[in-house]
Image (spheres, rainbow, N blue to C red):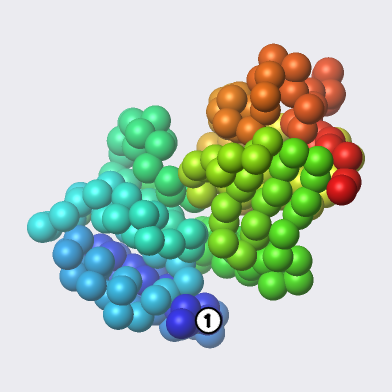
Amino acid sequence: MMEENLILIVEDEPEIAELVQDYLEADGYRSILASDGLEGLDRFFQHQPMVAVLDVMLPKMDGIELCRRIRAESNIPIIIMSAKKSETDKIIGLGIGADDYVTKPFSPGELVARIKAQLRRFKHLSGQIENENTLKYTGLEINLKEYTVHAEGRQVELSAKEFQLLAYMAANKGQVFSKEQLLEKVWGYQHIGDTNTITVYVRKLREKIELNPSEPKFIKTVWGVGYKFDGGNL
Ligand code: CA
């Protein structure tokens, strides 16, 4: 059972870990610390936190591998802390499934704000999952509880973010979203906000769910604005 508002911090520099923990505590959030990657993975399984904050350079297993391992098990928000801007950019390029990034040195207050933003977004998505289990359209079925998608009768494999983007748009059928809005709603951040991310994800989604990706039936381009989800209800 996932523990409400519990935050896992994996950081081998105790001063940073404790500072972040103090800030979280002052805001009423509980957190657990781990000082290397393996311990972080252990704590993740043991405590089932709702958010994970991972340093990149860690003893025993680095934050990138740890992020991949956690992502393979769970859709909880993951925030990566890295030492340099160039390192951050490189990690974003790897597509390891993290939800947000901070570059050191950061202010603990800023990190806490990011953590809270991720928690809100995650709970909002989870809330949708509780209210509605399946979104059904002609030729497309999205199961929000099992995180599965069937398109034109076959099950398609989506990454967590592809799924979240599709589910978000489908839950708001007909509504036109700009790329910036989708970044903010699904990724939950604006600062690194590269709207090319959305272009790339929409292309991948179309390749997976559309019979003819160049004439999409579900994710329509609204020229000059962005995208909208379309699909005849069953
Ligand atoms: Ca470190």
Residue 145: x %, y % from top left = 61, 65
Q: Is 133 left, or right, of 47 in this rendering?
A: right
Image position of 164 with respect to 201: above or below:
below
In the rendered image of this protein, does residue 206 appear above or below residue 115?
above
Q: Is residue 198 visible?
A: no
151 left or right of 13 in image: right
Near-viewer residue (5 or 192)? 5
**Ligand 1: quadrant of the figure:** bottom left
Residue shown at 58% from the left, 31% from the top: 208
**Residue toward you, 154 or 74:** 154
Q: Secondary structure at mark 1?
A: loop
> In the rendered image, which residue does mark 1 sit on?
4
Front residue of 2/93: it is 2
Horizontal arrangement in the rendering, residue 220 relative to residue 103 (left or right):
right
Q: Position of residue 115 (x, y in %)?
A: 51, 64
In this picture, is 68 found above or below 198?
Answer: below
